[in-house]
Amino acid sequence: MTTSDPALERAAIACAGARKAVALTGAGISVESGIPPFRGRGGLWEKIDPMKYAHVAAFENDPAEVWKVLFLGISHVLEKARPNAGHQGLWRLEEMGVLQTVITQNVDGLHQQAGHRDVIEFHGTHAFVRCSVCGRRSDWRSVPLEVIPPRCECSGVLRPDVVLFGEMIDPRLLQRSQQLAAGCDVMLVIGTSATVEPAASLPVIAKHSGAFIIEVNPEPTPLTHRISDVTLLGSAGEVMEQMASMVQRLRSNRQPS
Ligand code: APR
């Protein structure tokens, strides 16, 4: 990917003209922050079986095991992670008034750390835990982890406030995301394999409502050629940095002198 790449230029022109762009992000945007993706080479699901450790039934059956293998493992990686050039490039698009909202499947909080004000955490967040019995929510850092699984004052088992396989997306978040997808003029789809529903349908809704779809991923996905108007094959960090700079140039050239 170079700055003279025609695909990058098409994407940047679409972004520069956008007034209500929305981004849908997945694990790939955080890879350059040291967080492994779920699928593909080096993916978490290559090492552990998601049905054994990331399904709500597995958690209900043996919460201690799911805590030890999945939740503590993820938390260890997230502790050290900081936003990378991909998150920062996306933030620059928000600063320029191009990007309205980030819908993320990630639970790492890195978009908020990068500066975004409106982030929909479609699959929840690892920054909070909630009680599986009374539903009380608290900061992850306030939870004593000497005994696993940790418990709430009501004695219910605590868990990260994330969506496990077999669980529903918060209907309010789903509805708002679908509305944003239907109303955006550009959708940036960054670092997602687009294989997990209902998130995978958001670009389809956007496309059918007339949005221009820009995909950023080093690998093709089920959206490539079918739904995406432009696919930028590269890492989120490299592509978003170049894209943000190009959009900035295009927008400043438009300003009346
Ligand atoms: N930049 C951009 N994309 C990248 C990079 C990178 N540096 N590295 C990898 N990718 C791409 C991969 O090619 C892949 O298409 O990121 C994508 C990651 O896909 P998944 O691991 O499937 O992540 P995601 O799409 O977010 O998964 C959706 O599945 O397991 C559940 O709840 C979990 O939220 C997750 C959901």
Image (tube, rainbow, N blue to C red):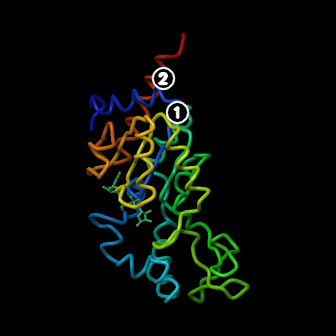
Tell me if residue 57 comes above or below residue 92 in the rendering: below
User: As shown in the figure, which amino acid type bears the numbered disc 1?
Assistant: Val
Question: Residue under circle 2?
Answer: 251
Query: What kind of element bears circle 2?
Result: helix
Q: Earlier in the sequence, mark 2 or mark 1?
A: 1
Q: Quadrant of the C terminus?
A: top right
Residue visible at 37% across and 39% down? 214
Query: What kind of element bears circle 1?
Result: loop
Foreground mark, 2 or 1? Answer: 1
Q: Is residue 241 left or right of residue 101?
A: left
User: As shown in the figure, which amino acid type bears the numbered disc 2?
Assistant: Arg
Question: Residue under circle 1?
Answer: 98
Report the residue that reaches farthest toward the right: 153
Q: Is residue 62 visible?
A: no
Q: Is residue 109 left or right of residue 236?
A: right
Residue contact between numbered discs 2 and 1, judged by CB atoms under 8 Å: yes
